[in-house]
């Protein structure tokens, strides 16, 4: 009776292994809702990759709060992607030596090394994303500070690159000039933790900078890269035959024409949301739909549910754990208990169940 993510196990695992094999130094990213799978499951999967001999030594989480979810299911290093700030408590001693902090401001570097002179960290260099990171000048200052702290474990420099269509190579080349100029201790200055580079870009960089090692942080392409291994379904919980003019729903709206109301599992608590109205959005197009008496014209919006391959309309906005769909007369009416397909954003969906088949 749930919103379920069903995974073709053999297919998913072979995709994970293919990505790991193609990306030595891979840093799997497990953050947020665990890309739909949950953080714990991704941590165990990362451990599985490591146990299978892949070059996976660090797992990345998004925030410090996520560490407990993964720390007991994965035994390697734990990179925290959100930069450390002075108000963040240091991890408990049992975890401290496994955690690699991201440090994105010179002042934070000073503070962190004061509190834990042996902290493990990566220095984040700001990119065209302009999210977090030190400027070239700050990185240079950081280099000086780190040289004076031989106990600190600087594990490299992090670059968070935008998702973009054009090449990142020009930007990465410019950023690496700053890294070299910062004169960091050997390993720190030549290990670059990167995101969103294509395989071709990574290969080109490894070619151009043979003394550097590039560690790709990958989430989406790893966990969600083979969509055909994944299927999302909801269950039909109830079916009501309705005539034009019948009232229904929280708002007592009336049914515009005869058909069926379907109650399906999945609602706002799962992240099921309203989609854009069907068809074109222009006023003119909308007026034309109105004239034709289309269902969306009377306020029904497209839902992410599809039945027999056809995307269906919400009868009203999704409820907390269920949604109501309208099925016009003439369509095949599914039985209570049948499953229907749902198109979701995996990174924004909380599934009731994740079923790995095989
Ligand atoms: C989320 C994130 C990634 C992984 O992004 P995907 O697009 O899911 O591969 C890499 N680096 C940082 C800093 C991130 O926040």
Image: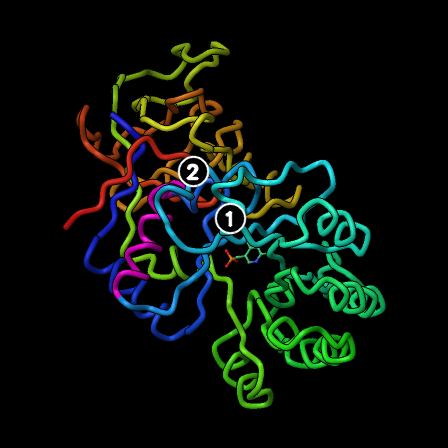
> Which residue position holds label 2?
69
- Circle 2 packing at 10 Å, graded few (<14), some (14-19), many (20+), is some
Q: CA distance from mark 1 to mark 2?
A: 10 Å
Nearer to the camera, 266 or 27: 27
Q: Is mark 2 within 8 Å of ligand 1?
A: no
Q: Is residue 357 above or below residue 69?
A: below
Q: Is residue 38 magenta?
A: yes
Q: Residue drawn at (32%, 54%), measured in percent from left and top?
A: 47
- Circle 1 packing at 10 Å, graded few (<14), some (14-19), many (20+), is many
Q: Is residue 283 magenta?
A: no
Q: Is residue 176 above or below residue 216?
A: below
Q: Is residue 85 left or right of residue 195?
A: right
The secondary structure type at the circle numbered 1 is: strand
Q: Position of residue 314 (x, y in %)?
A: 43, 29
The secondary structure type at the circle numbered 2 is: helix
Q: Residue drawn at (41%, 18%), measured in percent from left and top?
A: 255
Nearer to the camera, 222 or 342: 222
Q: Give the main secondary structure of the magenta stretch.
A: helix
Q: Is mark 1 within 8 Å of ligand 1?
A: no
Q: Is residue 352 left or right of residue 253?
A: left
Q: Position of residue 322 (x, y in %)?
A: 37, 22
Q: Is residue 130 left or right of residue 73?
A: right
> Which residue position holds label 1?
61
Q: Earlier in the sequence, mark 1 or mark 2?
A: 1
Q: Residue drawn at (72%, 64%), measured in percent from left and top?
A: 125
Q: Is label 1 in contact with label 2 (beta carbons under 8 Å)?
A: yes
Quadrant in the picture for residue 181: bottom right
Quadrant showing the N terminus: top left
Please report the bounds of the magenta region as a residue range: 37-52
- The chosen color scheme is rainbow
Q: Is residue 258 above or below residue 101?
A: above
| Quadrant in which ligand 1 is drawn | bottom right
């Amino acid at each position: 009776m749930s919103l379920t993510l069903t995974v073709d196990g053999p297919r998913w695992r072979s995709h994970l292994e293919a990505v790991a094999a193609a990306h030595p130094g891979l840093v799997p990213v497990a953050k947020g809702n665990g890309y739909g799978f949950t953080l714990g499951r991704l941590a165990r999967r990362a451990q599985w990759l490591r146990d299978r001999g892949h070059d996976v030594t660090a797992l990345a989480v998004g925030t410090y709060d996520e560490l407990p979810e993964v720390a007991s299911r994965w035994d390697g290093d734990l990179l925290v992607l959100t930069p450390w700030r002075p108000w963040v408590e240091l991890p408990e001693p049992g975890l401290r030596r496994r955690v690699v902090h991201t440090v994105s401001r010179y002042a934070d570097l000073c503070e962190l090394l004061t509190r834990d002179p042996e902290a493990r960290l990566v220095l984040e260099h700001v990119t065209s994303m302009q999210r977090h990171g030190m400027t070239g000048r700050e990185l240079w200052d950081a280099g000086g500070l780190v040289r004076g702290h031989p106990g600190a474990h600087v594990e490299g420099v992090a670059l968070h690159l935008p998702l973009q269509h054009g090449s990142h190579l020009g930007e990465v080349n410019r950023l690496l000039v700053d890294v070299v100029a910062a004169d960091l201790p050997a390993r720190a200055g030549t290990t670059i933790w990167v995101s969103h580079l294509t395989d071709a870009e990574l290969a080109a960089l490894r070619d151009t900078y043979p003394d550097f090692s590039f560690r790709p942080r990958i989430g989406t392409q790893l966990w969600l890269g083979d969509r055909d291994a994944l299927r999302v379904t909801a269950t039909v919980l109830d079916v009501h035959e309705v005539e034009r003019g019948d009232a229904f729903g929280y708002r007592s709206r009336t049914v515009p024409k005869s058909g069926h109301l379907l109650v399906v599992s999945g609602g706002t608590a799962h992240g099921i949301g309203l989609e854009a109205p069907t068809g074109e959005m222009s006023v003119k197009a909308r007026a034309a739909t109105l004239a034709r008496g289309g269902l969306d014209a009377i306020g029904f919006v497209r839902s992410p549910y599809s039945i027999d391959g056809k995307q269906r309309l919400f009868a009203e906005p999704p409820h907390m754990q269920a949604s109501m769909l309208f099925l016009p007369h003439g369509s095949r009416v599914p039985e209570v208990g049948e499953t229907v397909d749902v198109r979701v954003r995996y990174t924004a969906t909380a599934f009731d169940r994740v079923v790995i088949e095989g």
